[in-house]
Amino acid sequence: MSVATTQISVQGSEPIFHVIDEHDHPEGASTMLGFWIYLMSDCLIFAMLFATYGVLGGNYAAGPAPKDLFDLKLVALNTTMLLLSSITYGFAMLTMEKSKIGQTQLWLAITGLFGLAFLGIELTEFAHMIHEGATPQRSAFLSSFFTLVGTHGLHVTFGLVWLVTLMVQTARFGLTTANRRRLMCLSMFWHFLDVVWIGVFTFVYLLGMLR
Amino acid sequence: MTTDSHALHSDAGHDDHGGAAHGSLKSYLIGFGLSVILTAVPFWLVMTGTIADKAVTALIVLVLAAVQIVVHMVYFLHMNTRSENGWTMMAMIFTVVMVVIALTGSLWVMHHLNINMMPMHDMNQMP
């Protein structure tokens, strides 16, 4: 780019400070980088929520502590669900590259079921906690806990909506270039949520039980 | 600089210089195997309480989590220094710097604030 501007400034009387020759931008060429930058900004949101939990996580206000509330067996099961959904989404991507539409749809459906299982278990846990009086209003610890884990759960929910949408899209229009690109974006989103969950089960659940 | 290689390739469009990287069955399975181990070990450590010292357990759990995040980044999100001309890596490094500053800063400052608060009455000492 600097080469182009210097050439122009030598030839013309006035220097031009923008790219003269427009190089082609194929559709979706910058989508993956743009989506990656979105994920990084999402990462910052979670970092702030983790910081909030880190600061407030010890303020029980004479209410229940992590030890009284968390069931690590349930969390381990939940983690397994999300981890399995990550690998099945990986399989969906591999079959997509081979253009096997039926298998891709099958793996996407399995991923969705694991995601649904994750959400179901998480909501059961929340319902159990709220039933015992451990609501977000009870203490600063519980407020920050529900905000952090709830935001992650909300992301998984929207990921599932997106997954179903793309399955319908793929069923109607096939594995077109646009649909492949969308499935790649969702793949990054889904794996990213798994990365955030590593932080959640480590910081919130495991370290909470050690407190 | 990268602008040189960019200029060389610019006539061929964006496709050739690295979109997102793809994985293979092998890399997915390696990643999955590693993350199963890296998840199971910290859960086992905390649930059984094998190591008596809680601080040591917490440290091991944190280190394993950091390793697992890197494993997921490499094997599932296919992070490398080449994809998108290294801009994904650049964006990630920037984010990691921001996250580290925000997390350590918040925890550090608020911890000291707590320590330096006026000592409260310890209700357990009351008659």
Image (cartoon, coloured by chain):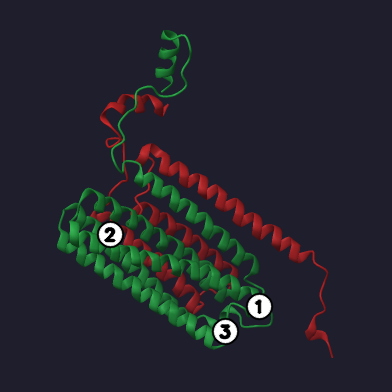
Chain colours: A green, B red
How far from the left and from the top, in percent, is residue A118? 38, 74
Query: Which residue, as the protein is rendered here, is positioned at the far front?
Result: A13
Label 2: state its secondary structure.
helix
The chain that hosts pointer 1 is A
Visible in this render: residue B20?
Answer: yes
Q: Which residue is mark 2?
A: A90
The quadrant of the picture occupied by the N terminus of chain B is: top left
Q: Amino acid at mark 3?
A: Asp
Please state which of residues A202 and A143 is positioned toward the viewer in this rendering: A143
The chain that hosts pointer 2 is A
Among numbered discs 1 and 3, the one appearing first in the sequence: 1
User: Dot 3, how many residues are within 10 Å of its Cα: few (below 14), some (14-19), or many (20+)?
Assistant: few
Image-quadrant location for residue A144: bottom right
Image-quadrant location for residue A156: bottom left
Label 3: state its secondary structure.
helix
Q: Which residue is mark 3?
A: A68
Please state which of residues A25 and A113 is positioned toward the viewer in this rendering: A25
Q: Is residue A68 above or below residue A204?
A: below
How far from the left and from the top, in percent, is residue A170? 21, 59
Label 1: state its secondary structure.
loop
Q: Which residue is mark 1?
A: A60
Q: Are discs 1 and 2 both within one chain?
A: yes
